[in-house]
Image (cartoon, helix red, strand yellow):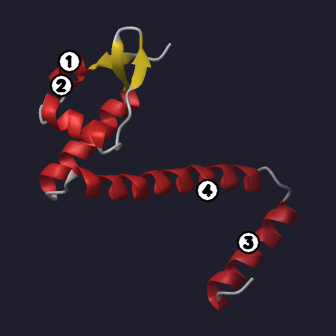
Amino acid sequence: MARHYSETEVVAILDDLDRARLQSFVSAQVVTPVVTPQGPAFTEADVARLQLLCDLSEFYDLRPDSLGMVMSLIDQLNTARGDMRALIQAVASEPDEVRGRIMTYVRRVRVTGQG
């Protein structure tokens, strides 16, 4: 079962996070707590995301609304990386002939920019 952290626990874990900042991140919808019988809670992934949000807002002076755009781009990049990893595994499972054709096609696209 996944571990959930209360608002109090998250604020205690992350040095750069206080309740007001946490609420601003939730209000900006850059992190969304899960609803539990005990109240709003955050997953381990949320805690890591909150640390990144704190770092971005501190180092780059980004406001919560700007953080939404940055986090959306990061989420898209992570999705693309996962898709690429799955695609690489799928290609690796194909016979040599198929992998060779795929590599030839990829090289042609890199050189010409056309498929």
Q: Where is residue 87? Give x, y as percent.
A: 69, 55
Mark 1, mark 3: which one is toward the viewer?
1
Mark 4, mark 2: which one is toward the viewer?
2
Residue located 34% across and 52% down the image: 68
Q: Where is residue 90? Give x, y as percent.
A: 75, 51
Q: Mark 1: few, some, or many residues within 10 Å (few <14, many ≥20)?
A: few
Q: Secondary structure at mark 2?
A: helix
- The answer for how far apart the CA atoms under marks 4 and 3 are is 15 Å
Name which of mark 4 and mark 3 comes first in the sequence. 4
Amino acid bearing label 4: Met
Pick the front one: 55 or 19: 19
User: Is there a contact, CB below 8 Å, between mark 1 and mark 3?
Assistant: no
Q: Which residue is mark 4?
A: 84
Q: Which residue is mark 3?
A: 103
User: Is there a contact, CB below 8 Å, between mark 1 and mark 2?
Assistant: yes
Q: Mark 3: few, some, or many residues within 10 Å (few <14, many ≥20)?
A: few
Q: Which residue is mark 2?
A: 11
Residue located 12% across and 31% down the image: 15
- The answer for how far apart the CA atoms under marks 4 and 1 are is 38 Å
Q: Mark 2: few, some, or many residues within 10 Å (few <14, many ≥20)?
A: some
Question: With 103 as the anchor, is 11 left or right in this view?
Answer: left
- Mark drawn on residue 8: 1
Mark 4, mark 1: which one is toward the viewer?
1
Amino acid bearing label 2: Val
Q: Where is residue 106? Give x, y as percent.
A: 70, 75
Q: Secondary structure at mark 4?
A: helix
